[in-house]
Image (tube, rainbow, N blue to C red):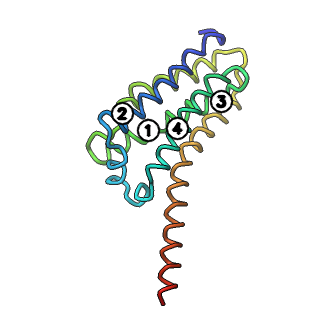
Amino acid sequence: MEHGDDSRVYWALLAASCAHVAEEYAWPGGFLAAAREMAPGVFGNASITIVVGVNASMILGCLYGALMRKRNPTFGLSMASMLLVNSAFHAAASLRTRKYVPGLVTGLVLYVPLSLRAFSAYRASPRYRRSSAWRAAVQGAALHAVPFVAFAARGALARKAGNAEQEGCR
């Protein structure tokens, strides 16, 4: 695949992210409940508002990655990396719970091959820089951590509000 043709993989990643969200929340759905069952300490502080924001950000990030792939290939690759990390989390969750976790199928069937294809296409391009590929891989993993930080912040704020309320009752 020539560098000029690599746009298809980024558009496919965008479509895959939409399919992934549909699998998690529409058909068959139930991701948030499954996540809370698997890791209540983490996902107990997840709200629908945060989840919608996270998924909208992911889809918009994939759109931006597809649109800016030539000007900023590192960003598109970071989205590919984030989706690859996400597929690993779904696989680990399914193995841990020994059952299907919504998002597993699109994660394994779409995210893994498309993400690897994005990195492979970049590697074959004349603009390839090893440092950019590594930076993208690290950025993707960091982006995947953002929702967990949001959940933790929401939990800390809730605990602080609960402690303040208890102090006011004394």
**In front here: 113 or 167?**
167
Residue 84 at what x, y percent from top left?
49, 33
Residue 126 at what x, y percent from top left?
71, 14
- For the point 51% across and 24% down, which residue is it? 13
Label 1 near label 2: C-beta < 8 Å? no
CA separation in Å, label 3 and label 2: 29 Å
Q: Which amino acid lies under the numbered mark 3 shown in the image of this protein?
A: Ala
Q: Mark 2 or mark 3, which is nearer the start of the sequence?
A: 2
Q: Which amino acid lies under the numbered mark 4 shown in the image of this protein?
A: Ala
- Tell which tag, 4 or 1, sits nearer the viewer: 4
Circle 3 residues within 10 Å: few <14, some 14–19, many ≥20: many
* Mark linked to residue 133: 3
Q: Mark 1 or mark 2, which is nearer the start of the sequence?
A: 2
- Tell which tag, 2 or 4, sits nearer the viewer: 4
Q: Which residue is mark 2?
A: 23
Q: Which amino acid lies under the numbered mark 2 shown in the image of this protein?
A: Glu
CA separation in Å, label 2 and label 1: 16 Å
CA separation in Å, label 3 and label 1: 19 Å
100 sits left or right of 60 in the view: left
Outermost bottom residue? 170
Image: 147 above or below 139: below
Q: Which residue is mark 1?
A: 88
Q: Which amino acid lies under the numbered mark 1 shown in the image of this protein?
A: Ala
Residue 110 at what x, y percent from top left?
43, 25
Quarter holding the N terminus?
A: top right
Q: Which residue is mark 4?
A: 56
Element class at badge 1: helix
CA separation in Å, label 2 and label 4: 15 Å
CA separation in Å, label 4 and label 1: 20 Å
